[in-house]
Image (cartoon, rainbow, N blue to C red):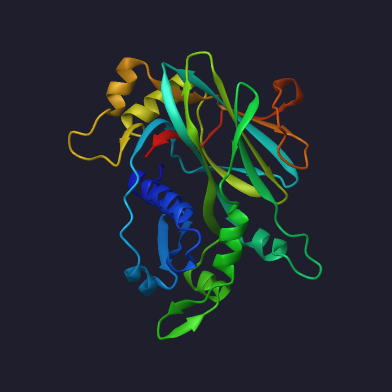
Amino acid sequence: MVMGLKVRWLILVVSVIAAVVVVSLFIIKFAFIKRGHEVVVGVGGNSSRHLPPLPVPQFIYYGSLACNGGVVIPGNSLIVLVYHVHGTTLINYVSISIDVPLTVINYSLPGPSQPGMVMGMGVYLNGTLIATSIASPTTAIATIVNTTYPLGNKTVSFWQYARAANWSVIHTGFVAEFPPINATPGDVIAVAIYSSIPYILPSCNVSSEAEEVQLMVSNDWIGFIPHYPNATPTAMQLYIEGTYITEEPIIYIATAQGLPRVISMNNLTIFMKNTAPDYVIARYW
């Protein structure tokens, strides 16, 4: 099974717009996804009529996976995902999707005897940190959980709504934006995620990067997004040009208390093989 590209694009658009207008909490939108179900809840949406219309971001995805497998990542761990550049790409955007179980959230929200949630993502080029996530999923999760929602003819808490909808997870993720960089053949991009709590990485069960390329091309997961008529480059054009980014089908793990400034593969151990977590590496404007 794969997640619909339109749903993923909507989530990315919401993430980018939210980063631009973060000072205006009146128009934040949150996406909750339990496999196969999506609910979008607006908070104070009427206030948005006083703001100018926002442009819809456009992307060129150079690397992207969107499968519905899942790998449980333990808390208090640093995982590292490694990507290889094919051709010359101009990138300024990285996102990683995660699912956070409601049972974990219920325990981990800050309180008198609770440890709280700490999560962060770093992007590395040839081992050196070049960007961190623009916002932690913990901020969105805390806001989501502490917001009330309409259910029938009454207003209920998040937990009541979640039980009624039979949710088991909140679908969220990390987004990193940075000045455009030219990534060329031989460059290695790494993404490190630190989390004090357990979470789930949506992922593809693949054994090689060549298999990933076939998935990206056959499902139109790379190329110009959204898929306007005659928009270029298409997935097939990027494939023919040899311009794309692939992910090692390996999840590496290390013990850490945060994001390091430098990533060395010598300090990592293999956590799981034949697994490539969902991601997007792109140029957006």
Q: Residue 38: which quarter of the image?
A: bottom left
Foreground residue, 99 or 228?
Answer: 228
Foreground residue, 182 or 149?
Answer: 182
Compared with 226, 220 (above or below) is above
Compared with 70, 61 (above or below) is above
Please give the name of the residue rendered at 48% of the width and 82% of the height, measured from the top-left corner.
155
Most distant residue in the left direction: 230
Position of the C terminus, as image quadrant, is top left
Residue 108, percent across and down? 71, 61
Foreground residue, 54 or 4?
Answer: 54
Residue 179, percent across and down? 49, 34
Please give the name of the residue rendered at 32% of the width and 29% of the height, measured from the top-left corner.
218
Q: Residue 152: which quarter of the image?
A: bottom left
Foreground residue, 130 or 273?
Answer: 130
Please give the name of the residue rendered at 56% of the width and 47% of the height, measured from the top-left corner.
134
Most distant residue in the right direction: 113
Residue 165, percent across and down? 47, 69
Number of marks drawn: 0
Position of the N terminus, as image quadrant, is top left
Most distant residue in the bottom direction: 153
**Does 210 sit left or right of 142 as displayed?**
left
Residue 277, percent across and down? 54, 36
Compared with 208, 103 (above or below) is below
